[in-house]
Image (cartoon, rainbow, N blue to C red):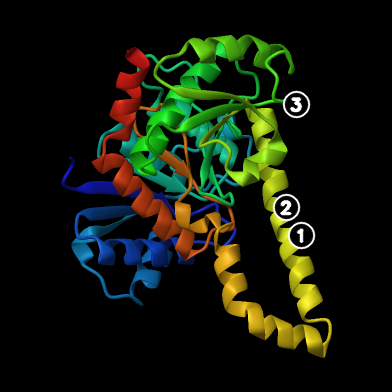
Amino acid sequence: MKDSINIVIDTLGGDNGAAPMVKGAVTGVNSDSSIKIYLTGKEKELNELLKGYQYNKEQIEVVNTTEEITCHDAPVEAVRTKKDSSMVVALNLVKEGKADAFISAGSSGAVLAGGQFIVGRAKGVKRTPLAPLIPTLERPVLLLDCGANVDAKPEVLVQFAKMGSIYMEEIEGIKNPKVAIVNIGSEDEKGNALVKETIPLLRECSDINFVGSIESRNIPYGEADVVLTEAFVGNVILKLYEGLSKALMKEIKGAMLSNFKGKIGALLIKKNLKKTLSKFDASNKGGAPLLGLKGLVVKIHGNSKENEVISAIKQCSEFIKKDVSGKIINGLQN
């Protein structure tokens, strides 16, 4: 187990600026003396923000950069040309071995491109999936892929299944996690060509617990621990999940505050409602790792606040200490 963890945080590109990244970093090092954090971005701004906190100065180091990759930039071109951007400088720290993990709330496309081109895929990895944990009634499930590989082949999804199984066992502590593939029905004969070709390969795979197909409506009930799909479908599921959650919350809040009786009822159920809704709060589960790289790359939401940054730091620490990347690579070679 690794004794010290070096994490680099890209402080630019997120919707809320550098402030939540700095606050999350300070909380992270104050809760764990084994962590050192590099902050890449505007040195003057970062040092000014850090003045407002008490922390061990040896645990946080500011790395000045002069460029920023935004959501309006073409991802691949930006990664190749903006060499002194906060994201590229941060990713190079991982490539050079100075940092064990990278966290960013910036452009998803640039994070994916930078992870592939700068950090690089580990030996034997065909494709690297973006794998977020999504909440369910039972416990969080791993959705992969949700954005990195729109066109995937059957053998790639089999690798995703192995990666996801190792991740859930090591990080979430789930023994023999259930793996399912997203389909339009539960029968093996249903689905598109990719699903039909992948199912027999998954059934032949002895080192995963494949339970068959899962319809998207059953995902929120936690019927599988690892949910497989290519990135187009995965991204649609993720975005619908997030949008529907926000819409329902808005409606519930509106109904409760619409009249006096509603407000009284809201006060009476506030504690129980908060506990119930917390099951569907993914902000305390960290970000979405890009699995299968030579180093750990984690993408958090663009509108992340300090709580998600703190969760991502804890996620990276556990990931590195348990050598999940190494176990994934070994698992793919067996």
Residue that appears at 80% across and 87% down: 261
In-front residue for pair 28/273: 273
**Which amino acid does the dot numbered 2 rest on?**
Gly
Question: Under tag 1, what secondary structure?
Answer: helix
Q: Is residue 308 visible?
A: yes
Please give left or right for residue 326 compared with residue 11 in the image.
Answer: left
The answer for how far apart the CA atoms under marks 2 and 1 are is: 6 Å
Residue 201 percent location from the top left of the image: 53, 10
* Residues marked 2 and 1 touching at CB (< 8 Å): yes
* Residue on which disc 3 sits: 184
The answer for how far apart the CA atoms under marks 1 and 3 are is: 25 Å
* Residue on which disc 1 sits: 247
**Which amino acid does the dot numbered 3 rest on?**
Ile
The local crowd at label 2, few if under 14, some if 14 to 19, many if 20 or more residues have their Cα within 10 Å, is few
Question: Under tag 2, what secondary structure?
Answer: helix
**Which amino acid does the dot numbered 1 rest on?**
Ala
On residue 243, the disc is 2
Please give left or right for residue 286 compared with residue 122 in the image.
Answer: right
Q: Name above or below for residue 112 compared with residue 162.
A: below
